[in-house]
């Protein structure tokens, strides 16, 4: 991987994506050159290349909590978070022992709580939901992992992020989508940084983009840019309104 900005150099993804502060929320997304957030098969697994996988692992290595919407969990078949031996070694060197906790955001808890995401998790998976979720589903989610209830009719993301930090010590929160969750976090002013992989492909069509119904312009400031095999890896600061 080559770093293009702020100065040309060979880049180690782990170092290139080191957080700028001890407490941050970052979005990690991949899109085609024409903005498509999913590939021809309806997922993201084949949209990015080998460099994108390295970035994905580096961002997870720096995270204390990995936030993901329930729709993305279902669409992508999310499993438990696992560390490679090399990443585990680097986490230990930074004082982190266990893998980052997976946090699923859902207002209804329409999840397979018997899936490996819950049954094989090294760190118990957290379900972040609201009081309007069915009581029996809340009880089942609490038994399957850990339950955090924030908000009445909908998930209060600001309270949820605050709880992750106060109760779990999750200073570094990484969000992996999907577009609706990204938009809600951005609209609430909770996002510090966008990490975007631009895949060298045109897909066309009217599929989803990395945000959905944002409702307002969000300005970005370019922090760094890297390249590998034609893919671009862009780090943007989310600017205050």
Image (tube, rainbow, N blue to C red):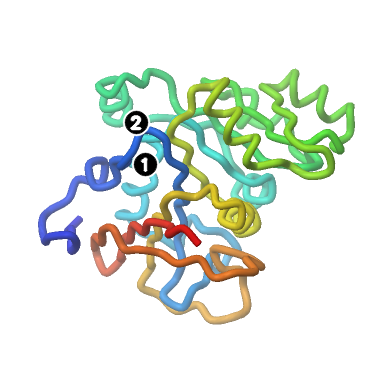
Q: CA distance from mark 1 to mark 2?
A: 9 Å
Q: Is residue 150 left or right of residue 187?
A: right
Q: Residue at x 56, y 56 (%)?
A: 186
Q: Farthest residue in the front direction?
A: 241
Q: Nearer the viewer, residue 37 or 158?
A: 158
Q: Residue at x 73, y 42 (%)?
A: 155
Image coords of residue 240 (percent x, y): 46, 58
Q: Residue at x 27, y 69 (%)?
A: 230
Query: Looking at the image, is mark 1 or mark 2 nearer the viewer?
Result: 1
Q: Farthest residue in the right direction?
A: 135
Q: Which mark is residue 84?
A: 2
Please count the marks in the image.
Answer: 2
Q: Is residue 170 above or below residue 232?
A: above
* Residue 125: quadrant of the picture: top right
Image coords of residue 96 (percent x, y): 36, 21
Tell me the element at label 1. helix
* Residue 154: quadrant of the picture: top right
Q: Is residue 207 left or right of residue 154?
A: left
Q: Which mark is residue 57?
A: 1
Image coords of residue 202 (percent x, y): 45, 79
Q: Nearer the viewer, residue 98 or 19?
A: 19
Q: Of callouts 1 and 2, which one flags the residue occurring earlier in the amino acid sequence?
A: 1
Q: Residues within 10 Å of mark 1 (few under 14, many from 20)?
A: some
Q: Is residue 80 above or below residue 238?
A: above
Q: Quadrant of the N terminus?
A: bottom left
Q: Residue at x 33, y 49 (%)?
A: 55
Mark 1 in CB contact with mark 2 (< 8 angstroms): yes
Q: Is residue 118 above or below residue 70?
A: above
Q: Is residue 94 left or right of residue 241?
A: left
Tell me the element at label 2. loop
Image coords of residue 192 (percent x, y): 44, 49
Q: Which mark is residue 28?
A: none
């Amino acid at each position: 991987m080559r770093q293009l900005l702020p100065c040309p150099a060979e880049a180690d993804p782990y170092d290139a994506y080191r957080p700028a502060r001890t407490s941050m929320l970052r979005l990690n997304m991949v899109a085609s050159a024409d903005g498509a957030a999913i590939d021809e098969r309806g997922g993201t697994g084949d949209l990015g290349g080998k460099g994108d996988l390295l970035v994905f692992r580096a961002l997870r290595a720096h995270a204390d909590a990995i936030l993901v919407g329930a729709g993305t969990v279902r669409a992508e078949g999310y499993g438990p978070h696992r560390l490679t031996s090399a990443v585990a070694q680097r986490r230990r060197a930074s004082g982190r022992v266990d893998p980052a906790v997976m946090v699923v955001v859902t207002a209804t808890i329409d999840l397979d709580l018997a899936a490996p995401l819950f049954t094989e998790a090294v760190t118990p998976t957290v379900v972040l939901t609201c009081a309007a979720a069915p009581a029996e589903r809340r009880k089942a989610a609490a038994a399957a992992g850990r339950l955090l209830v924030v908000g009445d009719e909908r998930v209060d993301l600001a309270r949820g992020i605050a709880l992750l930090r106060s109760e779990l010590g999750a200073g570094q929160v990484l969000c992996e989508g999907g577009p609706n969750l990204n938009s809600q976090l951005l609209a609430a002013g909770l996002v510090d940084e966008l990490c975007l992989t631009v895949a060298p492909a045109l897909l066309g069509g009217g599929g989803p983009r990395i945000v959905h119904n944002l409702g307002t312009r969000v300005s970005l400031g370019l922090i760094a840019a890297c390249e590998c095999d034609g893919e671009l890896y862009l780090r943007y600061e989310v600017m205050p309104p």
